[in-house]
């Protein structure tokens, strides 16, 4: 289905590209930093303490998270299997994976204080697992690959399986078992730092927030610190290429989600690849075989996209290395610059899904009063049926604005990182010219994908 844009699509591309070019030029001219100096943002090189979260509030957050997890599982197992009337799908997909992730970019990584799986691990025994001494040492070579695999599996479920309430509850139980086993084998700190998907995801997103939390085990409290937005990424020190792939998965997964049901992506198979396949087979191919290979094509695209993005990212960095004439390795540049792409991944995800949140938020009060779909409704709230009609011009303008803001933030971060890494300001600026091309490419791809018409079947 198609809709007419408020102004020609090319004008959006020209305006966004011009904004990025102007931003790059201004930063390249005005931004200064001593070569190799620590990153300083204004006068705030460090976060400023503004208070403490008392232990009772942390306990309240943990209990609330456990109740949400338990309610999601119970609602799916015991409640109606109508996804619109059961709380668990909305609570998990829209509230947690969308709303809470976006909120984390503002309020900080509260999940680290309230992680229900980590709380359960600690409650299950004050033993080797709880103290961090697993049965085996976590291999450094594994890096963040378990989290990458879990993220791809999560998007696979969203795009190709669409589990109902009961299936989602069983998946959550299976994921809980996997988490407990991993914490028992490798220790809770290693597992929740590298492997547990939501811990890694929300820790990464939380680096963008102006608030940070520093737990104090002795006082059973957490210190709250205020910092400039975005600068939390400088506290992360990634070393593994698997971390690079994880961040690229956040961007590639959303891109593929927006593309895989479009006329372009389906036409690429049926009108481009299929004729070549039929010519290779040398004759007629049964429809069942074509459908099977189409399913393979769809699923293979999800797995390949992050690594396609990785190849492009490394190629751009190689160009940056050549332009700057630096001795730094492509690997060191890759892990240093990867978090500058995080704002792009986040805003693109928001542009893709924010209308879904607007539609589903209105039914949350009803679902919370009747989580199992038994028509309890003790507060006599209305069960809102038809979704509101959205003005597509406004939707498009918000999406374009989000994408543009994310890319400007990414350009700013990349400049700050470059000034910190390279030996001279000239090297830093020259290294960013290929990165600017990459940012422009991401802008064009992002706007193009959200403008693609969807296939009806």
Image: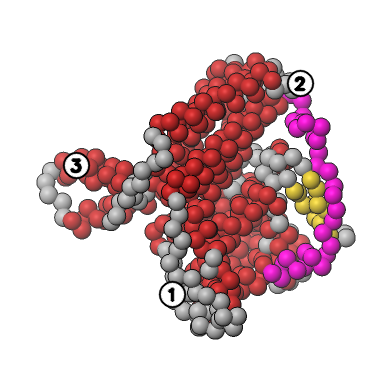
Which residue does the numbered mark 2 point to in the structure image? 34
Asked if disc 2 and disc 1 are in contact, CB closer than 8 Å, the reply is no
Task: Find residue 386 and name its label.
Answer: none
Give yes or no for residue 42 being in the magenta stretch: yes
Give the Cα distance between marks 1 and 3: 41 Å
The correct choice, above or below, for 391 with respect to 175 in the image is: above
The answer to whether 304 appears left or right of 120 in the picture is: left
Q: Residues within 10 Å of mark 1 (few under 14, many from 20)?
A: some
Q: Is residue 239 above or below residue 389?
A: above
How packed mark 3 is, by other alpha carbons closer than 10 Å (few <14, some 14-19, many 20 or more), is: few
Report the mark closest to the observer, 3 or 2: 2
Q: Quadrant of the C terminus?
A: bottom left
x then y, percent, for residue 160: 39, 59
327 over 139 or under it: above or below:
above
Let me know if residue 245 appears in the view.
no
- The magenta span reads 36-64
**Residue highlighted by disc 1:** 82
Tell me which label, 3 or 2, sits earlier in the chain.
2
Say how the picture is coloured: secondary structure
Give the structural element (helix, strand or loop) at label 3: helix
């Amino acid at each position: 289905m198609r809709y007419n844009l408020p102004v020609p699509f090319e004008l959006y591309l020209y305006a966004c590209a011009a904004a990025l070019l102007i931003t790059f030029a201004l930063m390249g001219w005005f931004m200064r930093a001593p070569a190799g100096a620590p990153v300083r943002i204004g006068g705030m090189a460090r976060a400023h303490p503004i208070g403490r979260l008392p232990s009772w509030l942390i306990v309240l957050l943990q209990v609330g998270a456990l109740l949400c997890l338990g309610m999601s599982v119970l609602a799916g197992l015991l409640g109606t299997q109508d996804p619109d009337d059961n709380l668990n799908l909305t609570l998990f997909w829209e509230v947690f994976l969308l709303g809470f992730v976006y909120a984390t970019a503002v309020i900080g990584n509260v999940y680290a204080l309230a992680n229900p799986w980590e709380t359960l691990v600690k409650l299950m025994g004050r033993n080797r697992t709880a103290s961090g001494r697993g049965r085996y040492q976590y291999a450094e070579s594994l890096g963040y690959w378990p989290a990458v695999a879990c993220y791809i599996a999560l998007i696979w479920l969203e795009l190709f399986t669409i589990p109902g309430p009961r299936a989602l509850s069983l998946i959550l139980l299976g994921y809980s078992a996997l988490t407990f086993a991993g914490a028992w084998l490798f220790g809770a700190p290693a597992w929740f730092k590298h492997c547990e998907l939501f811990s890694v995801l929300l820790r990464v997103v939380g680096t963008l927030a102006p608030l940070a939390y520093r737990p104090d085990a002795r006082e059973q409290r957490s210190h709250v610190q205020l910092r400039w937005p975005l600068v939390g990424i400088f506290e992360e020190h990634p070393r593994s290429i698997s971390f690079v792939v994880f961040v690229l998965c956040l961007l590639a997964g959303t891109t593929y989600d927006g593309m895989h049901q479009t006329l372009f992506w389906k036409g690429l198979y049926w009108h481009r690849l299929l004729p070549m396949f039929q010519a290779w087979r040398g004759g007629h191919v049964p429809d069942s075989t074509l459908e099977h290979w189409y399913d393979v094509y769809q699923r293979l695209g999800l797995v390949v996209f992050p690594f396609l993005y990785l190849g492009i990212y490394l190629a751009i960095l190689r160009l940056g290395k050549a332009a700057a004439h630096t001795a730094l390795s492509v690997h060191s540049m890759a892990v240093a610059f990867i978090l500058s792409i995080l704002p792009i991944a986040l805003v693109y995800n928001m542009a893709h899904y924010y209308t879904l949140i607007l539609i589903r938020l209105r039914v949350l009060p009803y679902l919370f009063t009747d989580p199992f779909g038994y028509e309890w409704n003790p507060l006599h709230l209305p069960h809102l049926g038809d979704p509101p009609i959205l003005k597509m011009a406004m939707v498009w303008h918000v999406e374009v604005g989000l994408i543009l803001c994310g890319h400007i933030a990414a350009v700013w971060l990349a400049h700050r990182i470059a000034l910190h890494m390279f030996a001279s300001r000239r090297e830093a600026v020259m290294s960013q010219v290929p990165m600017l091309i990459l940012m422009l490419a991401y802008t064009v791809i992002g706007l193009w994908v959200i403008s693609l018409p969807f296939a009806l079947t």
